[in-house]
Image (cartoon, helix red, strand yellow):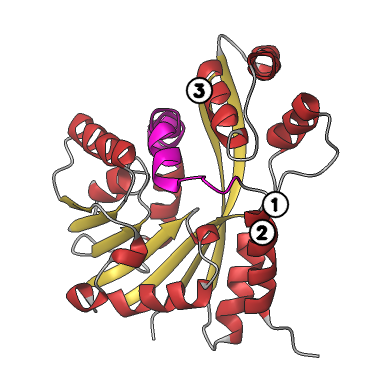
Amino acid sequence: MEVNWENKWEENYERYKETMLADSDDRMYWSKRAADFSNARSSNDFEYGRLVLNVLWGKVLTQKSVVLDVGAGPGTFVIPFGRMVGRIDAVEPAPGMVDKIRENACKDGITNFGILSSTWQEIDLESISGRYDLVISSLVLWVFRDVWNQLQRMEEASRGYCCIVANVANGNKHVETLWKRVTGCDEKWPSISEYPLIFSILHSKGRMPDVSIIEYTYERSVEDKVMHIKSLFERRTPVTPEMEKTIREYFIELSDNGMVQEPGISAVICWQAQ
C-alpha cells in the first residue's frame, strides 16, 4: 500500500505542537536564543555551514551564485557561503537573530548579503520568483504543517536548486536525559524526524534528491547550554530555579574547561527545482 508521506508529516507535526504552550512565540523564542545559537553555529569557524558549502560547491554553487537562506538564524550559511558566492539573502524574522547575522558578518568582513526581516510565509514570492540559483533551509521546516507547500515555495524562488539540511538522528540525548531528570516524566521529548520524511515526500512528488551526510561538532560553554535547554523546556513548562540548577550541574559534569563538545550528524538533501 502506498504511503502518504505528507500525512505522516502532518501527524508528527500535530503531536509535536500539542506538547507546546499555547502562547509560545517563535520570534521571541529565537531572539532569546540568538546568543547561544550563534556561539554554536559559529564554533570551529562555522564548521556546520562550511561542510554544507563543501557538499554543494562545484555541483550547485559557484563564485557567481546567488543564494536564498530561509530561516537564516545567526548567519549559519550567510558567513561561510558569503565568503565564496556572489550574494546570499537571508530570510529571518527574529530580531535577535538578525542582529547576530549583522554582527557575525561584520566580524568576518562579509558584505555581499541582504536580510529579509520577515517569516517565510510573509515573503511575496512574485517579487523573488526565479531569482536564486539555490534556495536553502536548515532546521526550519518543522514549524510548517503544510510542508509540501513550503517546499514548492522554495522551488518557485529558485532558478536552479533547492536544499534542505536536516538532522539525521531523531532526538537529542541531553534533552531526553534532562527532561526526565528535571520533570520525573518518562514521556520522550517531542521531535519531528525531518530527514526521512522530507526525502520521502520529495521522492513521492517526482523529485530525485541527492543526499550527502555530514558530521560536525559544536563547542558551547556551560552557560550557553544551560540557556539552550532552559529556553527549550520553557516552551513546555515553567523552569524553576531548582530545575535550572539540575541542568547546570549536568553540563558542568560533562564539560572540559567550561566547554561542552556536542557532535552532530545531518543530511544535505539537494534537488533540482521544477
Q: Which residue is mark 3?
A: 224
- Residue 12 drawn at (x, y percent): 68, 63
User: Magenta-highlighted stretch: main secondary structure?
Assistant: helix
| Mark 3: amino acid | Asp
How packed mark 2 is, by other alpha carbons closer than 10 Å (few <14, some 14-19, many 20 or more), is some
In this view of the protein, which residue sits in the foreground, 219 or 246? 246
Magenta stretch: includes residue 23: yes
In the image, 175: left or right of 231? right
Task: Tell me, for residue 267, which label it has, or none.
Answer: none
Q: Residue at x 24, y 49 (%)?
A: 82
- Residue 170 drawn at (x, y percent): 70, 52
How packed mark 1 is, by other alpha carbons closer than 10 Å (few <14, some 14-19, many 20 or more), is few
* Cα–Cα gap, marks 1 and 3: 22 Å
Tell which circle, 1 or 3, labels the residue nearer the N-terminal end.
1
Q: Is 232 located above or below residue 190 in the figure?
A: above
Q: Which residue is mark 2?
A: 193
| Mark 2: amino acid | Ser
Task: Tell me, for residue 170, which label it has, or none.
Answer: 1
Q: Which span is picked out in magenta?
A: 21-47
Q: Residue at x 75, y 89 (%)?
A: 2
